[in-house]
Amino acid sequence: MPTAAKLIAGLALALTAAVAACVFIQEHPEMPIGLRFVLGNAFVGFFAGWYALGRSPGYSNMTGAMSGLRSLVMLLIGAGIVFGGRFVFSNLGQFRSRDPVEIPLLWIETTFEYVVLALTPSVGITLLIGGLLSGIATYQASRHWR
């Protein structure tokens, strides 16, 4: 059932993910990523906010902020899985000689590499501030609009 808390959580984490993706693009100009990367992260952020943060916004501003940080972990893992899977499936032709068991392992390895690559100080600070503000905004929305 859609609630105001879920909508605010989804929109706030989508905005956080989009801003963090823009910071990531500025830090890595050599990587061929663009608007689809920003929109993809915003899409993953919306669902991470809707399902992880919107369902349990907390009972105070502090627990709301902690819920926002918890949902950032879901955002990072989700974005890593989406973009790692996109990389593996777009390059599937190169893996024809591989064993079918190696492809999911390559997906996991690529996901881990993308998450580690994304954890730079400026992206981390952006995510931290955005997660705290998203959690507090979601708590306030759940308290005022029932």
Image: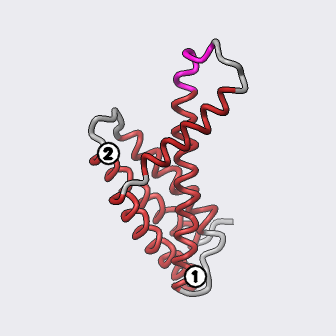
Q: How far separated are the C-alphas under marks 2 and 1?
A: 31 Å
- What range is drawn magenta here? 89-96
Amino acid at circle 2:
Ile
Estimate the x, y position of residue 27 in percent, counting from the top left: 29, 47
Q: If you read the primary sequence from the N terminus, does the residue marked by circle 2 or circle 1 appear first?
A: 2
Magenta run includes residue 83? no
Q: Residues within 10 Å of mark 2 (few under 14, many from 20)?
A: some
Q: Residues within 10 Å of mark 1 (few under 14, many from 20)?
A: some
Q: Quadrant of the C terminus?
A: bottom right
On the picture, is 15 further left or further right than 64?
Answer: left
Q: Quadrant of the N terminus?
A: bottom right
Amino acid at circle 1:
Thr
**Disc 2 target residue:** 25
**Could you tell me which residue is drawn at 52 percent across and 47 percent down?**
79
**Could you tell me which residue is drawn at 35 percent across and 59 percent down?**
121
Q: Looking at the picture, tell me which residue is in the foreground, 122 or 140.
A: 122
**Disc 1 target residue:** 63
Q: Secondary structure at mark 2?
A: helix
Considering the whole magenta stretch, tell me its main secondary structure. helix
On the picture, is 36 further left or further right than 63?
Answer: left
On the picture, is 81 further left or further right than 36?
Answer: right
Estimate the x, y position of residue 14 in percent, counting from the top left: 46, 58
Q: Secondary structure at mark 1?
A: helix
